[in-house]
Amino acid sequence: MPNFAAGVVKFQRDVYPSKKEFFEKLAEGQSPEALFITCSDSRVETAMLTQTEPGELFICRNAGNIVPPHTNNTGAMTASIEFATAALNVPHIVICGHTECGAMKGAMSSPEGLENLPHIKEWLGFSKAAVDIVKHLGADLTPEEKMSMLLRQNVILQLNHLRTHPTVATRLAIGDLQLHGWVYDIKSGGVLAYDEKTGEFSPVDQHYAAEMAELAAAHACT
C-alpha cells in the first residue's frame, strides 16, 4: 500500500495541478464514447491500451470479461450495461478478452478442479458454450491453439449474450449502437478485432483502417 499512497501523492502534486480545469470539467458529468467490458486481470491496463483520458471509457471488469445473458435478476453487470446504454447513451460497446486469461484456463479445465471455488465455477458457466465449441471444432489443435480459439469464441459468445439485454437490443434496432469484440495479446501488444460479417479476427489497424483514415483527415483539417 505505501507504493499506492505514494502514487496518490504524486498525482496530487505533479499531475492534478496541470490538469485542474480538465478535472473540474469532468466533475460536471460524463459522456463516455464506449462501454469497455474486459477482464479483471491486473495486466490489462485499459487506459494505456486505448490511450484514453478519464471520462472517455465507462469500464466494467470481471473474471473472463463475461456478460451473463439478461434475466430478471439484478446483477452488477446487468445494471452497468443498462446504465451505460440507457442513461449515458454510449455509441459503442467493446468486449475485450486477453491472452493468458486465468478465467478461460479455468473454463477449459475439468469442473472438478473448481470444486473449492463454487462461485467461480458458476460464473464460468457463462462461457460453457465457447468451451463446447472449442472441444468440437478444435479437437485436433494443440493446447495453445485451443486456448487461442477459446479466447475468440468467448468474446463472440459474450457479444451474443450482450444482445439479450433489452436496452442493448433496442439501441441496436434503432441503429445508434455498435458492438465490438477484441482480443488483446499481453506479450506482443497486439489487438485483434472481430468482423461479424466474415466471422474472422484481424488486427485493429486493418479492421478500422477506413475509420482511422477519416479521423486523421478530420484532425488534419482542424
Image: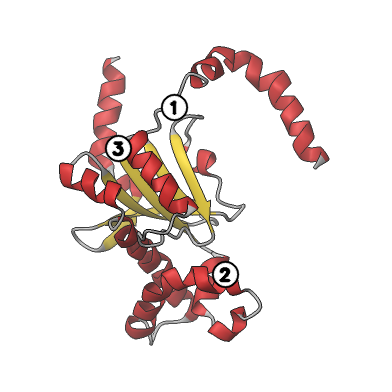
Q: Which mark is residue 108?
A: none
In this rendering, position of residue 153 left or right of residue 49: left
Of tags 2 and 3, the one toward the viewer is 2
The x, y position of residue 78, in whole percent, is 41, 52
Above-or-below relation of 194 to 53: below
Residue depicted at x 49% and y 51%: 76
Q: Earlier in the sequence, mark 2 or mark 1?
A: 1
Q: Can you identify the residue that label 1 sits on?
A: 30
Inter-mark Cα distance, 2 to 1: 33 Å
Mark 1 lies on a secondary structure that is: loop
Residue found at x 52% / y 38%: 47
Three-letter code, disc 2 = Ile
Residue occupied by mark 3: 91
| Callout 2 crowding tier (Cα within 10 Å): few <14, some 14–19, many ≥20 | some
Q: Which residue is mark 2?
A: 120
In the depicted view, which residue is nearer to us: 128 or 12?
128
Viewer-proximal residue among 95 and 100: 95
Tell which of 213 and 31 is nearer to you. 31
Element type at mark 2: helix
Q: Hey, what amino acid is under mark 1?
A: Gln
Q: Secondary structure at mark 3?
A: loop
Label 1: few (<14), some or many (≥20) within 10 Å? some
Residue 48 in view, yes or no: yes
Which quarter of the rendering shows the C terminus?
A: top left
